[in-house]
Amino acid sequence: MCAEGLSAIIHRNEEAGLLHDCSIVRGAPTISHLLFADDCYFFFRAKGAEENVMKRILNRYEEISGQMVNYNKSTITFSPNTNGNDRQEVCAQIEVNEVQAPGKYLGMPMVIGRKKVATFKFLLDRIEQKLQGWRHQNISKAGKIILLKIAAQVIPNFWMNLLLIPLEVCEGIEKRMNAFWWCNSSTAGGVEDYKQCQPTGNEADES
């Protein structure tokens, strides 16, 4: 109920022309705010005193709901074309610190720049961490298949359904899974041991 009230206040200010929402690209739907549990993202222009409007909205929300905004845990990110003076003024008015990367929202990175491999490196780390815990266990081939399909492969599925994962990251996921498949329980190797864990001879023919 509190979130609905906050959303209504924001829409009211948008209709009055006091706030302007944002669009990622031309023709895409515009977004003014995202609300989930106690996480909130607000989008507005860094000009036209819109930061003052947003500050008044947050103050009004605190008065109505009795909830307090934790500004120490709140941050703001600007588009690259925002000049330094506007950045400083907005940060001072809203009382938040600027960060270059806003982090994640519902598990998804909020900003994906040109270094896409570095952005999605966390997928490789999560899969490697999962596989590392299984390498020291005596697991049959059938057990490995179940673990790879049910536990390991589902990790990147959520992101792959929404975003284009870089080919280098996909290849890294495949290499880690192949290394786990071909290494036996006594081999603690990771990706660096991939060549040593490749099938040879009759074993390769059987595969």
Image: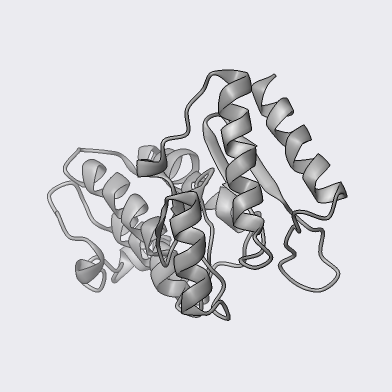
Does 3 sit above or below residue 141? above
- Residue at x-position 23% and y-position 48%: 132
Q: Nearer the viewer, residue 60 or 116?
A: 60
Name the quarter where the N terminus is drawn: top right
Residue 125 in the image, given as x and y percentages of width and height: 32, 56
The colour scheme of the drawn protein is one colour
- Residue at x-position 55% and y-position 67%: 165
Does 108 sit above or below residue 59? below
| Whether residue 193 can be seen here | yes
Q: Nearer the viewer, residue 181 or 45?
A: 45
Q: Is residue 43 left or right of residue 185?
A: right
Q: Nearer the viewer, residue 3 or 157?
A: 3
Residue 126 in the image, given as x and y percentages of width and height: 35, 51
Name the quarter where the C terminus is drawn: bottom left
Q: Is residue 138 left or right of residue 81?
A: left
Residue 172 in the image, given as x and y percentages of width and height: 39, 68
Q: Is residue 21 left or right of residue 178?
A: right
Q: Nearer the viewer, residue 159 or 9?
A: 9
Residue 94 in the image, given as x and y percentages of width and height: 49, 50
- Residue at x-position 63% and y-position 21%: 64
